[in-house]
Amino acid sequence: MRLERSKPEDAKEYAQWMWDNRLTNCASIESLRNCTVFKISGILHLPVKTVLMLESLAPNPEVTGHKRLLAIRRAITDLRKQFPHTEIVFLTKGDTQLDEAAKFYGFTEMPFKVYRMRPDDSSRAAQTYRAKVAVEDALQSVT
């Protein structure tokens, strides 16, 4: 199994599999725009999109009102200029002033859970299969 970039001839299969999984994958034509699609042939199509994730917003607690809102708007405007066609998301606990500001400026709340994998995170799968993966990697480098 090898991850590779999808080719135009994979589009029909990709579209069919996305349709077949529509009840669980939350995909839409809009969410799939600007994706690069990768595949493991015959098993998986994986649309990938670059997203700017603001780990959180951290305004000065002493600055409130319009000045804070304008700073948030300016930051978002500048980020959109630097990273055109890139979605911007941020984490929040919900029901805060920042949530209201986000809605005011065009952010929409996503109706699903978000899972995160940090570069230094190791999963149960990685711990369980570390030896097997090491052997597979060694075999692939030889062949």
Image (tube, rainbow, N blue to C red):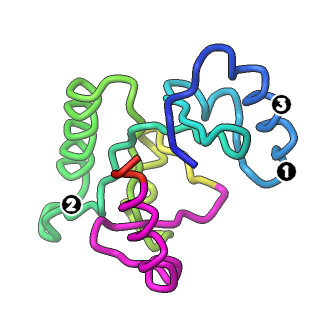
Mark number, residue 12: none
Q: Nearer the viewer, residue 8 or 105?
A: 8
Name which residue type carries label 2. Answer: Thr
Name which quarter of the figure residue 130 lies in. Answer: bottom left
Q: Which of 88 and 103 is in front in this view?
A: 88
Residue neighbourhood size for the residue with mark 2, other residues' Cα within 10 Å, grouped as few (<14), some (14–19), many (≥20): few
Residues in magenta? Answer: 111-139
Pointers 3 and 1 in contact (C-beta within 8 Å): no
Name which residue type carries label 1. Answer: Leu
Q: Name the residue under label 2.
A: 64
Residue neighbourhood size for the residue with mark 3, other residues' Cα within 10 Å, grouped as few (<14), some (14–19), many (≥20): few
Mark earlier in primary sequence (1, 2): 1
Q: Is residue 73 above or below residue 8?
A: below
Q: How far apart are marks 1 and 2 (CA)?
A: 42 Å
Q: Is residue 92 left or right of residue 55?
A: right
Q: What element carries label 1?
A: helix
Identify the residue at image location x=56%, y=25%. Answer: 33
Name which residue type carries label 3. Answer: Gln
Mark earlier in primary sequence (3, 1): 3
Q: Name the residue under label 3.
A: 16
Identify the residue at image location x=69%, y=22%. Answer: 10
Name which quarter of the figure residue 84 lies in. Answer: top left
Q: How far apart are marks 3 and 1 (CA)?
A: 13 Å
Q: Mark 1 points at which residue?
A: 23
Identify the residue at image location x=21%, y=52%. Answer: 68
- Furthest-front residue in view? 142
Of the two numbered discs 2 and 3 in the rendering, the one whose residue sits closer to the viewer: 3
Q: Nearer the viewer, residue 12 or 142?
A: 142
Q: Where is residue 8 in the image (x, y as percent from the top left)?
A: 62, 14
Q: Is mark 2 on a helix, strand or loop?
A: loop
